């Protein structure tokens, strides 16, 4: 039976593959110039999600002028377009013999020590910098990572992305029906990665993020406390030029030892959220201000905050 959706998915797949081929044929410097032009188009001409971005920036940086918010919004779009080009260039440019040319590990000894332990460990990052770059390089270095993600609706694109990530040891765990696989990761000495800045709805854990309550998924803290895991917070931040990053471990704690931060789900969630905020403040133009991170919290969460 002929299905139009299958034809649409296949056409989208070919469109994406052709786009990747074009990006790979261009120099990364040319990609940067194109990204700058596309950023101007999206931010200043088409004004895509301009209101959401401006409201988020005004919430996070109330001291900023409207002009500075517009400038950072344009830089954010440039970062996003350039990120796509960098990911397309990754397999051809970055290898296990030259990775040091592209990423600098701040306090690399500590990072290596934490990744080489046989303890359950979880890496929390955000929609900041280039998390695809980070996972790729960690895989090259022999530190496979696992991340929980919803499969793409397009089966052809989902297969392509899965193969790209799996080539260097980045593995995706489906969001539904994944608990046994999560347990295997946590007990096998591998790293379980999370994006810790996603809105979790009214039933999430409400903690402060840039001075305002934000709903955060409970799973990160619950898994860390249940399995007495080491929690690492960090990101790959672009340093001036395309394809040049640094990985900075913003913070880490051992849930067996840090009593204050691991007194419960909320303290631990607030701890890593504060690390993410500090990380984003360092380079706000590299954060995805496009999504609605702040939404009205339930009355119960507001009362708890006022009573604290």
Image (spheres, grey):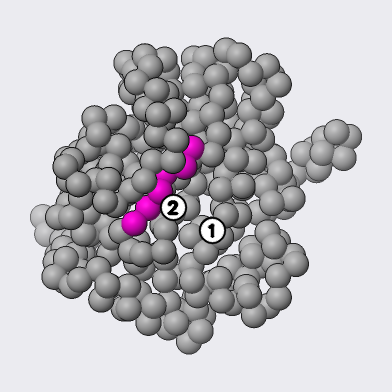
Tell me the quarter of the picture where residue 240 sits.
Answer: bottom left
Which residue is at a point 54% across and 71% down the rendered structure image? 73
Task: Give the structural element (helix, strand or loop) at label 2.
Answer: strand
Tell me the quarter of the picture where residue 276 sits.
Answer: top right
Tell me the quarter of the picture where residue 63 sits.
Answer: bottom right
Whether pointer 1 and pointer 2 mark residues with C-beta atoms closer than 8 Å, the reply is yes
Which residue is at a point 58% across and 68% down the rendered structure image? 53
Closer to the camera, 192 or 274? 274
Q: Could you say where residue 187 lies in the image, as x and y percent from the top left?
A: 36, 14
Q: Quadrant of the N terminus?
A: bottom left
Q: Give the crowd class for mark 1: few <14, some 14-19, many >=20 residues within 10 Å.
A: some
Q: Which mark is residue 237?
A: 2
Q: Could you say where residue 124 lies in the image, as x and y percent from the top left?
A: 48, 36
Q: Could you say where residue 66 lies in the image, as x and y percent from the top left?
A: 68, 78
**In the drawing, does residue 196 fall left or right of residue 146?**
right
Query: Real-space Cα distance between discs 1 and 2?
Result: 8 Å
Work out which residue is located at the far right of the displayed protein and give it. Answer: 307
Q: Could you say where residue 108 lies in the image, as x and y percent from the top left?
A: 39, 34
Depicted 212 relative to depicted 76: above or below: above
User: Which residues make up the magenta segment?
Assistant: 244-249
For the stretch drawn in magenta, what is the main secondary structure? strand
Depicted 240 relative to depicted 208: above or below: below
**In the drawing, does residue 163 fall left or right of residue 133?**
left
Specify which label sits upstream in the sequence, 1 or 2.
2
Which residue is label 1 attached to? Answer: 283
Q: Is residue 143 magenta?
A: no
Work out which residue is located at the far bottom of the displayed protein and give it. Answer: 45
**In the drawing, does residue 279 fall left or right of residue 95?**
right
Which residue is at a point 31% across and 78% down the rendered structure image? 34
Which residue is at a point 61% across and 47% down the rendered structure image? 278
């Amino acid at each position: 039976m002929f299905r139009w959706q299958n034809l649409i998915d296949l056409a989208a797949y070919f469109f994406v593959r052709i786009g990747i081929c074009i990006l790979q044929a261009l120099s990364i410097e040319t990609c940067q110039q194109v990204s700058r032009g596309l950023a101007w188009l999206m931010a200043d001409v088409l004004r895509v999600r301009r209101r959401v971005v401006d409201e988020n920036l005004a919430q996070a940086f109330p001291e900023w002028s409207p002009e500075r918010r517009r400038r950072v919004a344009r830089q954010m779009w440039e970062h996003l377009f350039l990120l796509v080009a960098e990911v397309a260039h990754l397999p051809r440019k970055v290898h296990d013999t030259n990775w040091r040319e592209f990423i600098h590990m701040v306090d690399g000894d500590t990072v290596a020590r934490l990744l080489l332990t046989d303890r359950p460990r979880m890496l929390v990052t955000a929609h900041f910098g280039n998390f695809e770059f980070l996972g790729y390089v960690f895989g090259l270095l022999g530190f496979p990572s696992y991340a929980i993600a919803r499969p793409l609706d397009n089966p052809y694109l989902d297969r392509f992305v899965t193969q790209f990530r799996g080539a260097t040891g980045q593995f995706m765990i489906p969001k539904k029906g994944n608990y046994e696989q999560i347990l295997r990761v946590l007990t096998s000495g591998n790293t379980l990665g999370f994006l810790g800045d996603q809105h979790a709805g009214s039933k999430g854990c409400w903690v402060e993020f840039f001075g305002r309550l934000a709903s955060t998924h409970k799973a990160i803290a619950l898994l860390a406390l249940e399995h007495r895991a080491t929690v690492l917070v960090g990101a790959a931040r672009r340093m001036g030029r395309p394809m040049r990053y640094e990985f900075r471990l913003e913070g880490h704690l051992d849930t067996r030892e840090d009593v204050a931060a691991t007194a419960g789900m909320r303290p631990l969630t607030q701890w890593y959220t504060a690390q993410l905020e500090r990380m984003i403040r360092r380079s706000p133009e590299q954060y995805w201000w496009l999504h609605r991170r702040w939404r009205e919290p339930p009355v119960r969460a507001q009362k708890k905050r006022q009573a604290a």
